[in-house]
Each structure stands twice: as structure tokens, then as C-alpha cells.
Image: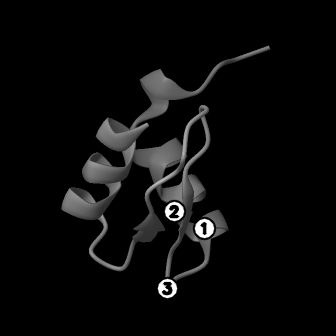
């Protein structure tokens, strides 16, 4: 999960995280609404959206 946290920090400057003790979770937050990020990703990277 450190890779994902590093990726978020690189591309979303407002991302702040704490190093986990283990497991597969990222303990972090954004200074902007994450729903806005999800919507932008959906429209800018449609190949990442799983269609049902």
C-alpha cells in the first residue's frame, strides 16, 4: 500500500497519509472532496471504470 500512497501524494498534492502497521489499508485523507476526484477519474480515465 505504500506504492499507492506514494502515487496519491505524487499526483494529488493534498493527500496526507499515515504509515500503516500492516494490512492492505491506506490511512489517509484529501483536502478536497474525494467524490470530485472519483468523478474526474471516471470521465478522464474511462478504461478504469468497470461496467456492469
| Whole-number angstrom distance, CA of label 1 to CA of label 3 | 9 Å
Residue furthest to the top in view is: 52
Crowding near pointer 1: few (<14 within 10 Å), some, many (20+)? Answer: few
Q: Is residue 29 above or below residue 3?
A: below
Q: Is mark 3 on a helix, strand or loop?
A: loop
Percent position (x, y) of residue 13?
Answer: 27, 75
What residue do we see at 49% from left, 85% from top?
A: 31
- Residue holding disc 3: 31
Left or right side of 52 for 30: left
For residue 12, what is the image quadrant? Answer: bottom left
In the rendered image, which quarter contains the N terminus?
Answer: top left
For residue 45, what is the image quadrant? Answer: top left
Q: In this view, does 51 lie above or below 25?
A: above
Front residue of 28 and 21: 21
- Residue holding disc 1: 34
Q: Is residue 48 above or below residue 2?
A: above
Q: Do the CB atoms of the residues marked 2 and 1 lie less than 8 Å apart? A: yes
| Whole-number angstrom distance, CA of label 2 to CA of label 1 | 5 Å
Amino acid at each position: 500500500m505504500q506504492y499507492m500512497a506514494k502515487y496519491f501524494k505524487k499526483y494529488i498534492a493534498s493527500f496526507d497519509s499515515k504509515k500503516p502497521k500492516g494490512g492492505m489499508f491506506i490511512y489517509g485523507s484529501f483536502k478536497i472532496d474525494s467524490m470530485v476526484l472519483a468523478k474526474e477519474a471516471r470521465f478522464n480515465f474511462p478504461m478504469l471504470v468497470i461496467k456492469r
